[in-house]
Image (tube, rainbow, N blue to C red):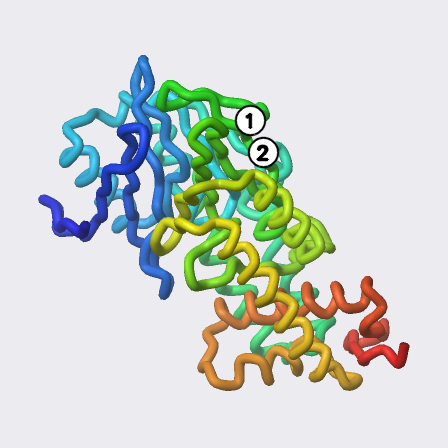
Amino acid sequence: MINTFQNGETVTIEKIVFNGYRIGIPIPFPIKYVYCYLFKQQDGYVLIDVGYNNNRGKTAWEDAFRELHMEPGEIKTIYLTHFHPDHAGLAGWMHQLTGAPIFMHEIDAKMMEHVWGENSSQARNIKKMVIEHGTPQELAGEIEKQMDVLVHHVQPLPAIHTITYQVVFANREWKVIHTPGHSTGHICFFQEEERVLISGDHILEKITPNISVWPGASQTPLHDYINSLHRVADLQAKIAFTAHRRPIGNVNERIKELLQHHEERLESILALAQNRTAFEVAGDLFAHKELTPHQWRFAIAETIAHLDYLSIENRAEKIMGFPIKYEKSNE
């Protein structure tokens, strides 16, 4: 359901399993909302993911707390599925508001500092990467500027604690499942008895999670992601509560669709790999869209991930030079 609360922000609050809440916090991207999860425990609440750091996000949380008749200080623990700004951007603000410690996988805890820290060089590193893959200097500069703007929607950074591989909330034990791919330290939560999965961005309804190569992260994200999909399929989850769009009922069917999508995308990219750069291939793949610098960043990085996958699998040759090019293998 969609509600407009006292401060005028549109927020979704939905009661889910284990007397938990699925709370949609608005984000300034086409996908519109990130869904965070709030569960009661004996001494208060556990919160999973926090949203994007802007005034709309803060106002939405203030309205949600009022609607749920709770004080922010009742949140005793915060878990982050991964370090991306729509999931972790409000972590510092939420920690200051609640006093709750924040936990995530140690890999993404390091990425938080690497990408969003005061001395981060990630924007320059991404600019260098996309130029090496054929992106024009002007567009690469716009991509760098956009990354620099994003930093302000994540800071201040809180202290981050490393999560264990089993946690308790909603009066139940949950396994913490490491699912690298969308980010190298991405995690899901799985309640084994009821076979309930909180999936973050690992699997989504209708849309496919972005799988990209980034400086400082895994350089084999598509291999990681495919392995993670198989690992989650083995869980035989009945339902996945996702971070975007609707929950997924037939989890393993959706996993099959995602695996098929990536194989089809690999075939499409392979057909375009004719001594060409990742930027050129991405331009063909997304020719039907007018991309912003933000969208170009993801389009190029996702294309690199697929081209590198093809190279590792000996289906394409990576020609190291300036710019880097790819050619369909003769084997």
Say which element carries label 2. loop
Which residue was labeled with disc 1? 163
Residue 110, position as x, y percentages in the image:
62, 37
Q: Residue at (71%, 83%) from the top-left corner?
A: 271
The answer to whether one can see residue 40 in this image is: yes
Q: Are marks 1 and 2 in contact (CB under 8 Å)?
A: yes
Foreground residue, 65 or 241?
241
Q: Amino acid at mark 2?
A: His
> Vertical placement of 229 versus 293: above or below?
above
- Position of 284 relative to 17 (above/below): below
The answer to whether residue 23 is left or right of residue 66 is right
Where disc 1 sits, the SS reads: loop
N-terminal of the pair, mark 1 or mark 2, is 2
Quarter of the image with the C terminus in it: bottom right
| C-alpha span from label 1 to label 2 | 6 Å
In the rendered view, does 269 fall on the left or right side of 64?
right
Residue 305, picture quadrant: bottom right
Left or right placement of residue 143 versus residue 249 in this view = right
For residue 166, above or below residue 240: above
Q: Which residue is mark 2?
A: 105
Question: Residue 119: in sight, yes or no?
Answer: no
**Where residue 178 appears, x then y in whole percent?**
61, 37
Furthest residue in direction top, as rendered: 43
